Image (tube, rainbow, N blue to C red):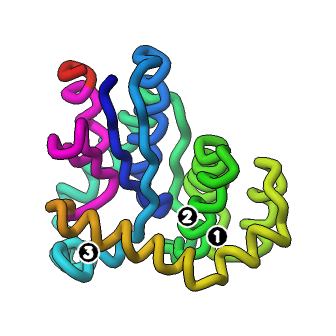
C-alpha cells in the first residue's frame, strides 16, 4: 500500500485545486493511504521562501495576467470555482488548528472542503469566528469543543510542528506532497506525476 502525505494550508487557491484533485485521484486508487497534514504556509514563506512576498510587491504584469487565466483554466478542469476574496492574504491560523480537531473526529475531508469553499468560492473571511462557527456546524463538529481545543497550546504546537517538519523535509509552499516518505512533489499540477508513480 502506498502512502501519500498532503501538507496543506487552506489560504492557497492552488492548494484548493490540489485538494480536490487528490480526492478525485483517491477515488481511482482506493488502496492509497492519505495523511492530511495541516500547516501554515506563511511560516514556510518566512523561513525559506521570502521571494513570494517580493513577487506580490513587484509583480510581473504579463505573468500576473496569465496567472489569473491559468487559475481559471485549472478551475474548469478540476470542477470548482475560485474567485478573488476581498481579504487576501488571510489569517488561516484558527482554521488550520481546527483541521486537527477535524482529523481527530474523522471529518477532515468535509472540513477542509468547507473551509476552502467558504474562502475561495463564497469569498468569506475564514479568520472570523462567525464564519468558522458556520463551517463547524456544517460538518457536524461540536462548536464549544472546537473553539476550546484550537485555543489550547497542544493544537498550536501541532500546527507549528507540521510547519517545521515541512521545512526540514525541503518544502517551500502549499500544497506539498510526499509519496512513500521521501518522494516530494509541489503544486496541484503534480497529481498526474504522482498517479503515474502509483
Real-space Cα separation, disc 2 to disc 1, in angstroms: 8 Å
The relative height of residue 72 versus residue 115 in the rendered view (above or below) is above
Which disc number belongs to residue 194?
none
Callout 3: SS: helix
- The residue located at (60%, 74%) in the rendering is 94
Tell me the residue that label 2 is attached to.
Answer: 85
In the image: residue 168, left or right of residue 121:
left
Measuring from the top left, give residue 133's x and y in whole percent. Answer: 80, 66
Using the image as rendered, state which of residue 96 and residue 125 is in the foreground: 96
- Disc nearer the start of the sequence (3/2): 3
Region in magenta:
172-194
Label 3 or label 2, whichever lies nearer to me, is 3
Task: Tell me whether circle 1 and circle 3 mark residues in contact (CB < 8 Å).
Answer: no
Q: Does the magenta-highlighted stretch encompass residue 193?
A: yes
Tell me the residue that label 3 is attached to.
Answer: 45
Tell me the residue that label 1 is attached to.
Answer: 125
Real-space Cα separation, disc 1 to disc 3, in angstroms: 21 Å
Task: Tell me whether circle 2 and circle 1 mark residues in contact (CB < 8 Å).
Answer: yes
Measuring from the top left, give residue 92's x and y in whole percent. Answer: 53, 71
Amino acid at each position: 500500500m502506498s502512502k501519500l502525505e498532503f501538507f496543506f494550508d487552506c489560504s492557497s487557491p492552488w492548494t484548493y485545486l490540489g485538494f480536490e484533485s487528490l480526492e478525485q485521484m483517491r477515488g481511482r486508487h482506493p488502496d492509497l493511504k492519505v495523511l492530511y497534514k495541516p500547516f501554515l504556509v506563511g511560516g514556510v514563506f518566512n523561513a525559506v521562501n521570502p521571494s513570494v512576498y517580493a513577487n506580490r510587491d513587484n509583480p510581473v504584469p504579463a505573468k500576473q495576467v496569465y496567472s489569473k487565466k491559468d487559475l481559471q483554466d485549472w478551475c474548469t478542469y478540476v470542477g470548482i470555482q475560485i474567485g478573488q476574496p476581498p481579504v487576501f492574504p488571510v489569517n488561516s491560523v484558527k482554521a488550520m488548528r481546527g483541521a486537527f480537531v477535524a482529523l481527530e473526529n474523522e471529518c477532515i475531508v468535509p472540513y477542509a472542503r468547507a473551509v476552502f469553499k467558504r474562502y475561495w468560492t463564497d469569498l468569506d473571511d475564514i479568520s472570523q469566528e462567525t464564519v468558522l462557527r458556520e463551517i463547524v456546524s456544517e460538518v457536524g463538529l461540536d462548536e464549544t469543543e472546537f473553539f476550546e481545543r484550537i485555543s489550547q497550546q497542544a493544537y498550536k504546537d501541532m500546527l507549528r510542528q507540521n510547519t517545521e517538519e515541512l521545512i526540514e523535509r525541503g518544502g517551500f509552499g502549499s500544497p506539498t506532497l510526499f509519496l512513500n516518505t521521501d518522494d516530494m512533489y509541489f503544486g496541484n499540477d503534480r497529481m498526474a506525476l504522482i498517479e503515474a508513480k502509483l
